[in-house]
Amino acid sequence: MAKLALINKQKKREKMVAQYAKKHDAIKAKMSVNATPDERMEAMKKLAKLPRNANRTRLHNRCSVTGRARGYSRLFGLCRQQVRTMASEGKLPGVRKSSW
């Protein structure tokens, strides 16, 4: 299981991304192809003044049970170990062991 500090840090980042999403998108829109170089430079400066954790690229998918960052399955929101254990316990509806 991941340290609680890492899980809490991730949640804090998610909140910050949600808080600044509209502002971030508005500034990025000003940096379009039609903008003059001065307008682009001004928009870049505004973007740089936003908090680092307000950027979506700083987010990392984590398992909702263990907080594990690697081996994450988007379909279930779980890491591979939890998918396997929950599937074998029958906790994931519609998932069953394959055989051919």
Image (cartoon, grey):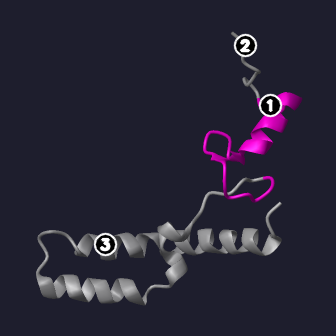
Residue 90 visible: no
- Percent x, y of residue 44: 29, 84
Q: Is residue 62 left or right of residue 49?
A: right
Q: Is residue 76 magenta?
A: yes
Looking at the image, the residue that sits furthest to the top is: 100
Mark 1 or 3 closer to N-term?
3
Question: Mark 2: which amino acid?
Answer: Ser
To which residue does mark 1 refer?
87
Q: Quadrant of the C terminus?
A: top right
Mark 2 or 1 closer to N-term?
1
Q: What SS does tag 1 mark? A: helix
To which residue does mark 2 refer?
99
State which quadrant residue 23 falls in: bottom left
Mark 2 or 3 closer to N-term?
3
Question: Mark 1: which amino acid?
Answer: Ala
Asked if the residues shown at circle 2 and circle 1 are in contact, with their CB atoms under 8 angstroms apart, the answer is no
Q: Residue at x 83, y 33 (%)?
A: 91
Which mark is nearer the camera, 1 or 3?
1
Q: What SS does tag 3 mark? A: helix
